[in-house]
Image (cartoon, rainbow, N blue to C red):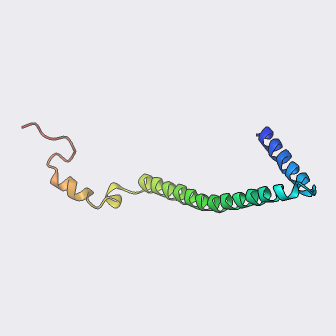
C-alpha cells in the first residue's frame, strides 16, 4: 500500500511540475482536469455506496436481534395456523 501511495504522490508531483512548464502546460492541463473530474465522480458514487452498505448492515443486525429476542409467533403470523393444522404438532408426516 505504501508503494501505491508513493507512486501516486510522484505522479501528482510530476503533473504539477509539468503544469508549470510553458510548452507542456497545454498537454498537462486536460489530464489534470480529467483526473479531478474522475475523483469527483468516484467520490459521488462512494458516498451513495457508503449509505447503502450502512443501511444494509444496520437492518441485517436488527433482523438478527429480532430473531434472537422474539418468539416465532411474533415473527410469523402464519405460525399458529400451521401448528393448529398439523395433527402431529411438527413437520414430520405420519406413515399411513
Left or right, residue 93 beside residue 49: left
Residue 4 versus residue 80: which sits nearer the camera?
4
Q: Position of residue 26 (x, y in %)?
A: 84, 59
- Residue 30, quarter of picture: bottom right
Left or right, residue 80 beside residue 39: left
Residue 96 versus residue 19: which sits nearer the camera?
19
Question: Residue placed at 36% from the left, 56% from the top?
Answer: 71
Residue 23 versus residue 66: which sits nearer the camera?
23
Q: Position of residue 11 (x, y in %)?
A: 83, 47
Left or right, residue 3 beside residue 95: right
Q: Position of residue 73 (x, y in %)?
A: 31, 58
Give the total of numbered labels. Answer: 0
- Residue 39, quarter of picture: bottom right
Figure quadrant of the N terminus: top right
Q: Position of residue 67 (x, y in %)?
A: 42, 53
Figure quadrant of the C terminus: top left
Question: Residue placed at 12% from the left, 40% from the top?
Answer: 94
Question: Residue placed at 91% from the left, 55% from the top?
Answer: 23
Above or below 11: residue 29 = below
Q: Residue furthest front?
A: 23
Question: Residue placed at 64% from the left, 58% from the top?
Answer: 46
Residue 12 versus residue 54: which sits nearer the camera?
12
Q: Residue furthest left?
A: 96
Amino acid at each position: 500500500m505504501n508503494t501505491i501511495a508513493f507512486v501516486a504522490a510522484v505522479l501528482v508531483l510530476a503533473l504539477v511540475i509539468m503544469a508549470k512548464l510553458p510548452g507542456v502546460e497545454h498537454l498537462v492541463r486536460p489530464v489534470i482536469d480529467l483526473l479531478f473530474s474522475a475523483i469527483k465522480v468516484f467520490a459521488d458514487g462512494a458516498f451513495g455506496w457508503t449509505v447503502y452498505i450502512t443501511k444494509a448492515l444496520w437492518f441485517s443486525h436488527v433482523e438478527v436481534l429480532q430473531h434472537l429476542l422474539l418468539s416465532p409467533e411474533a415473527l410469523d403470523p402464519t405460525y399458529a395456523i400451521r401448528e393448529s393444522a398439523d395433527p402431529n404438532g411438527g413437520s414430520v408426516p405420519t406413515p399411513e
